[in-house]
Amino acid sequence: MSEDNFFERVYTMARQIPYGKVTSYGAIAKALGTGRSARMVGWAMNASHNMEDVPAHRVVNRKGLLTGKLHFDGINLMQQLLENEGIVVVDNQIMDFDKHFWQPEIQF
């Protein structure tokens, strides 16, 4: 599978994350049948910031940390976008992570 095709599959999955919910890089990787490619999902999210229809702010690490925040414009844009959706973030971590977590459906 080419990197471009993988990235497109990641974007398709990210577009499914409901408003007010988050998922993890690893959960997306596992749902795509590539369970050990969480880092590659992160690369895809980093490459998506010019794509307004990909909600990259809704993808965090497995502990609910905003590890991708440095790739957003501004100091706290990722946090602000999440807070606009009703998600509380303290010290770069999503509060009530389990409540806000969205489990993607297996795609393979």
Image (cartoon, rainbow, N blue to C red):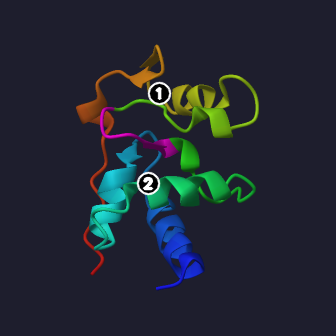
Q: Residue at x 32, y 53 (%)?
A: 26
Q: Earlier in the sequence, mark 1 or mark 2?
A: 2
Residue 7 occupies quadrant: bottom right
Residue 62: give x, y in percent of width and height.
31, 40
Q: Looking at numbered disc 1 in the image, what kind of residue is underneath it?
A: Gly
Residue 53: give x, y in percent of width and height.
65, 60
Q: CA distance from mark 1 to mark 2?
A: 27 Å
Question: In terms of secondary structure, where does tag 2 sit?
Answer: helix
Residue 56, placed above or below residue 28: above
Bounds of the magenta segment: 58-63
Check if residue 66 falls in the magenta segment: no
Q: Which mark is residue 86?
A: 1
Q: Looking at numbered disc 2 in the image, what kind of residue is underneath it?
A: Arg
Q: Which residue is mark 2?
A: 39
Q: Classify residue 5 as left or right of residue 28.
A: right
Residue 94: give x, y in percent of width and height.
39, 25
